[in-house]
Amino acid sequence: MSVPEAVKRSESRVRTWTFLTNHAHVLLAIARDPTVRLRDVADTIGITERAAQAIVTDLETDGYLTRERVGRRNQYTVNGAGRFRHPAEADRHIGDLLNLFTD
């Protein structure tokens, strides 16, 4: 007996999700290696380099990290004292999250 086409289509569209956003993944990658290239961050996370650049811009604009040019590379400094943006976690520092996932 063959599988109906509707079932095949629904199985191929299974949604996946993660607990951490791409913004969190980028921030964690930078916290682990402050001189990491955004191309490598993007490859690790599974996003485009342009998306990684946009996320870094968001994080820098909102004070979660700073960027400094050192030679031909960027060096990032993460502000662990920054607060989570969602009201449910606004009383927590992002440094708490970073401590969970970095050595």
Image: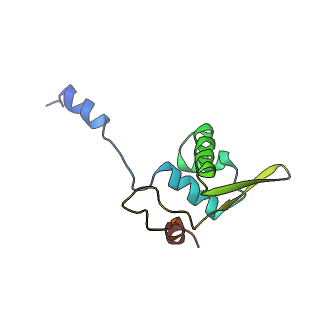
Quadrant (top left/top right/bottom left/bottom right) for the C terminus:
bottom right
From this view, report whether residue 22 is shown above or below residue 103. Answer: above
**35 sits to left or right of 47:** right
| Image quadrant containing the N terminus | top left
Q: Is residue 10 above or below residue 39?
A: above
Q: Give coordinates of residue 69: x percent, y percent.
A: 80, 52
Q: Work out whether residue 43 or residue 87 is closer to the camera in this orientation and state it.
A: 87
Is residue 13 or residue 80 the one in the foreground?
A: 80
How many marks do you count on the picture? 0
The picture places residue 60, in percent across and down from the top left corner, at 63, 51
Residue found at the very far left of the displayed protein = 1
For the point 59% across and 57% down, the residue is 64
Say left or right for 82 vs 91: right
Task: From the top left corner, tell me how far across and down residue 9 is, in percent.
Answer: 26, 30
* Colour scheme of the rendered structure: rainbow
Closest to the observer, 54 or 48: 54
Q: Image check: 85 left or right of 4?
A: right
> Residue at 62% across / 50% down in the picture?
41
- Could you tell me which residue is drawn at 54 percent across and 42 percent down? 47
Farthest right residue?
71
